[in-house]
Image (cartoon, grey):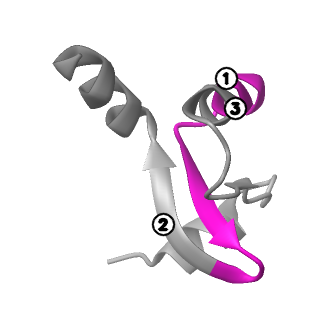
Amino acid sequence: MKTASYLLKSKLDQTVFTIAPTSSVFEAVQLMVDKNIGALLVTQGEQVVGIFSERDCARKVTLR
């Protein structure tokens, strides 16, 4: 099984996009659209505190 580290190293663009826990859902979705990605790491300083994905957004919208 390949690790996340291995998969990131195999990509040409190894940029990992992050967002602060205080950011809005709109800001997160806008960044994912701009970068054509499906998830963002939520970071506070240098520490990863969560992940926000398209799936999270889709579930919340569907429930409302």
Of residues 15 and 3, the one nearer the viewer is 15
| Numbered disc in front, either 3 or 1 | 3
| Stretch of the chain drawn in magenta | 30-47
Question: Label 1 sits on what residue type?
Answer: Val
Q: Earlier in the sequence, mark 2 or mark 3?
A: 3
Identify the mark at residue 27; answer none if there is no mark. 3
Residue 18 position (above or below residue 59): below
Q: CA distance from mark 2 to mark 1?
A: 19 Å
Q: Position of residue 23 (x, y in %)?
A: 67, 45
In the shown orientation, is residue 61 left or right of residue 62? right
Of residues 39 and 3, the one nearer the viewer is 39
The 10 Å Cα crowd at callout 1, few under 14, some 14 to 19, many 20 or more, is few
Query: Which residue is rendered at x = 25% and y = 28% of the image?
Result: 59
The 10 Å Cα crowd at callout 3, few under 14, some 14 to 19, many 20 or more, is few
Q: CA distance from mark 3 to mark 1?
A: 10 Å
Residue located beneath label 1 in the image? 33
Q: Secondary structure at mark 2?
A: strand
Question: Label 2 sits on what residue type?
Answer: Gly
Q: Quadrant of residue 21?
A: bottom right
Query: Which residue is rendered at x = 35% and y = 38% of the image?
Result: 56
Residue 4 position (above or below residue 38): below
Q: Secondary structure at mark 3?
A: helix
Tell me the quadrant of the picture where the C terminus can be found.
top left
Residue 41 part of the magenta-drawn span: yes
In the shown orientation, is residue 47 left or right of residue 58? right
Residue located beneath label 2 in the image? 50
Residue 43 part of the magenta-drawn span: yes
Tell me the quadrant of the picture where the N terminus can be found.
bottom left
Q: Residue furthest bottom?
A: 47
Q: Earlier in the sequence, mark 3 or mark 1?
A: 3
Q: Position of residue 3 (x, y in %)?
A: 45, 78
Question: Label 3 sits on what residue type?
Answer: Glu
